Amino acid sequence: MQSFRAFIIKEFKQIYRDKRTLLVLFGMPIIQMLLFGFAIRNEVENARVMVLDRSGDAVTRQLTGKIDASRYFTITGQLQRYDEIDSYFQQGNVDEVVIFEEDFARRLERGERPAVHVVTDASNPNLAQLIQQYSSAILLDYQQRRAPESRTGLTTRVNMLFNPQLESVNLFVPGLIAVILMLVSALMTSISITREKEMGNMEILLVSPLHPGQIIIGKVLPYLVLAFVNVLTVLALAQWVFDVPFRGSYGLFLAESLLFIFTALALGVFISAKASDQQTAMMVSLAGLLLPTVLLSGFIFPISSMPQPLQWLSHIIPARWFLVIVRSIMLKDSGLLFLWKETLVLVVMTLGFIALGIKSFKIRLE
């Protein structure tokens, strides 16, 4: 036991002396969190809008002011003719043009329905769709305030639960926790073990009193501790920098995070057992884990909208299950009663990766 304790202490010291490893362990998660958190957003802010007001009455001026007052839009100018629209879009100087037809207020007073024509640049279809949705919401809000009761007597009330402002940061930042933990934990573990094989230190460890299982645990344990520190760091960034709400249990969140770290570390051990050098381990960890974790876990794209074969494939991605856990705890205050299925899947995956890793590791040692 004393040899095992000395081996673990040696691993901690080795990591502390390796500045590049420390940079990857603590620098990369913070940089990823800040870059992805600020860059990946679904909502529109300060979209450039120009107005072609053919009526010029008080109502159209009110609507123009309401659009400009929104944080989603900025009125950049007024157009005088229809033939100016194409040139502004071609130059890339505008994201949307709002057109009010003639006698807008007068027709509104007579009970007619004057048209508001919204023109967007659909070369970026996602942005164009979002801009149209926001514009329609602003115009509909004005209409309901002006005439709250519709002629049919029907009123539609929509409640958005858990994320009423539809802030995309509340979707992506919890997902980033899963991506960061998977990449850092699996990558650093796989590189650490393959480094020993590359440098010929594995033969020295084999003649030591340590059991192969103790060697693996000793190599993994420091990264378990450091990855848990990363959990606390990215959680603090999520709440203090991005103001993401946390409605659930911190204890359950940390326990589930610890389970996911075990899953990622076990996967890293399995990769290192199959890889012959650090470069191979790095390529497999980045290419084999980064793309599936980002694309197939539900981090960016909803799994339900994927083709059926990809939906089936997503079931073997550990981050898919942890993403459900993180978002449910942080945004919905869900407990283990609602998350037992995802937790059980991660437990089974962890045990499977550990068994495969130890078996492959023993074969490589022999």
Image (cartoon, rainbow, N blue to C red):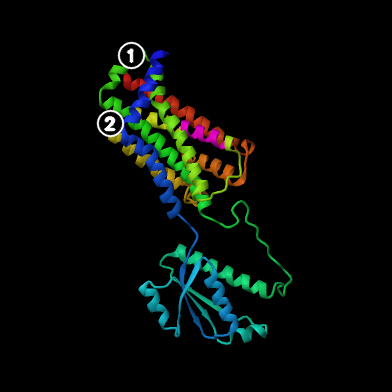
**Left-right relation of 343 to 47:** right
Residue at 33% in and 27% down: 14
User: Judging from the image, what secondary structure is the residue with disc 1 in?
Assistant: loop
Disc 2: which residue: 277
Which is the main secondary structure of the residues drawn in magenta? Answer: helix
Q: Earlier in the sequence, mark 1 or mark 2?
A: 1
Q: Considering the image in quadrants, where does the N terminus appear?
A: top left
Q: Position of residue 335 (x, y in %)?
A: 63, 38
Neighbour tally class for label 2: few under 14, some 14-19, many 20 plus, Cα within 10 Å: some
- Mark 2: amino acid: Asp
- Identity of the residue furthest to the right in this view: 153
Disc 1: which residue: 208
Q: Position of residue 106 (x, y in %)?
A: 63, 87
Q: CA distance from mark 1 to mark 2?
A: 22 Å
Residue at 41% in and 42% down: 29
Per the rendered image, the range of residues in magenta is: 252-262
Q: From the viewer's perspective, is residue 187 above or below residue 209?
A: below
Q: Considering the image in quadrants, where does the C terminus appear?
A: top left
**Left-right relation of 255 to 219:** right
- Mark 1: amino acid: Ser
